[in-house]
Amino acid sequence: MTVTDISDEGRFLAQGNVYLPHIAVIDEIIDETYDTKTLRINFKDEKLRDEFTFESGQFALCSIFGVGEAPFAISSSPTRRDYLEIAVRRVGKLTNSLHRLGVGTEIGFRGPYGNGFPLDLLQGKNLVFIAGGIGLSPLRSLIWNVIDNRDKYKKVDIIYGARTPADLCFTYDLDAWEQDKTVDMVTTIDREYEDWTGRVGLVPMVLEQVAPSANNAVAIVCGPPIMIRFTFPALEKLSFTPEQMLTTLEKRMKCGIGKCGRCNIGTVYVCRDGPVFTYAQIKDFISSEY
Ligand SMILES: Cc1cc2nc3c(=O)[nH]c(=O)nc-3n(C[C@H](O)[C@H](O)[C@H](O)COP(=O)(O)OP(=O)(O)OC[C@H]3O[C@@H](n4cnc5c(N)ncnc54)[C@H](O)[C@@H]3O)c2cc1C
Ligand code: FES
């Protein structure tokens, strides 16, 4: 048998069990909102801590032994190597259990998986980040990556919205980006709210008001499916082409490495072909399946 005769599965097995997670320790827990926490983690193994690399937009399968495993975007930037962060919204069994863990607890971590954002295509471009709720999590990794390499990119716009002020995640980052003179930041909430003096309006509507130019620009969108569905047409109105729009999709997953078929949407596997896609790649099936 030659090397090329070995199946992917065989190759993985030859390298060890790919489903075996690394052990990571929770170093810090940040309460983002009433239902979302950031877990700042680090690998137990020092060599792995030093050698681990990932790209903004990639995800990991995080687990609690005896409870389960689920995918989470890595929300920290690869330019900040002292730690990894994931933001966890409490929706079910595993995420509730992750919320109950304390500092010093060990969790399983396998990855990084997926394709990440295409940095080579983004360099030299005007970037328009559009996020809703916890959808800021994967974009945050890229935003800090861009800020840490600011001279490689042109204008940076960030439009971020949430249902209410209490749903805004990463408020410490929002403050930092507001202060950053190289970034144009707009934060909005869906409806008028007591004591909120900032902008009010749904993200796609605010996007049309801000009206970033499509010239030499790429829009990077992540948020709840309903926000994504209305944001793409708003971008089209502003003359962005489907190739100039990126998004990162979520779908239920099991293996994370293109084996089980669980994360299929249309003709793609989100874990293997994504989670980052251009709108051009997914527009034919996103409205019916997502
Ligand atoms: C690539 C990727 C990145 C993700 N990044 C994040 C992240 O950064 N932060 C975060 O909080 N969550 C993220 N998710 C979603 C997260 O994986 C699910 O919330 C998690 O699997 C729920 O597990 P559970 O056991 O708590 O919920 P379950 O008990 O399994 O389900 C509870 C509810 O959540 C829904 N649900 C479960 N999985 C998903 C899913 N993948 N997408 C949409 N709805 C789901 C179920 O339909 C059900 O209504 C991501 C998912 C993917 C695929
Ligand atoms: S999660 Fe198994 S193929 Fe994508």
Image (cartoon, rainbow, N blue to C red):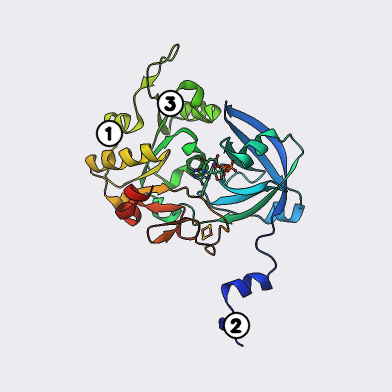
- Where on the image, by quarter, is ligand 1? top right
Task: Kindly tell me whether residue 159 is visible in this rendering.
Answer: yes
Give the distance between the C-alpha atoms of the residues marked 3 and 2, in whole angstroms: 53 Å
Say which quarter of the image contains residue 15.
Answer: bottom right
The mark nearer the N terminus, 3 or 2, is 2
Secondary structure under badge 2?
helix
Q: Residues within 10 Å of mark 2 (few under 14, many from 20)?
A: few
Q: Nearer the viewer, mark 2 or mark 1?
A: 2
Residue, x 55% and y 61% (percent of image)? 257
Specify whether 101 is left or right of 202: right
Number of residue marks: 3
Q: Secondary structure at mark 1?
A: loop
Q: Position of residue 93 (x, y in %)?
A: 62, 40
Q: Is residue 36 left or right of residue 210?
A: right
Q: Which residue is mark 1?
A: 211
Residue that carries the numbered disc 2 in the rendered image: 3
Q: Earlier in the sequence, mark 2 or mark 1?
A: 2
**What residue is shown with label 3?**
163
Mark 1 residue CB less than 8 A from any atom of ligand 1: no
> Which sits earlier in the primary sequence, circle 1 or circle 3?
3
Label 1 Cα neighbours within 10 Å, binned few <14 / some 14-19 / many ≥20: few
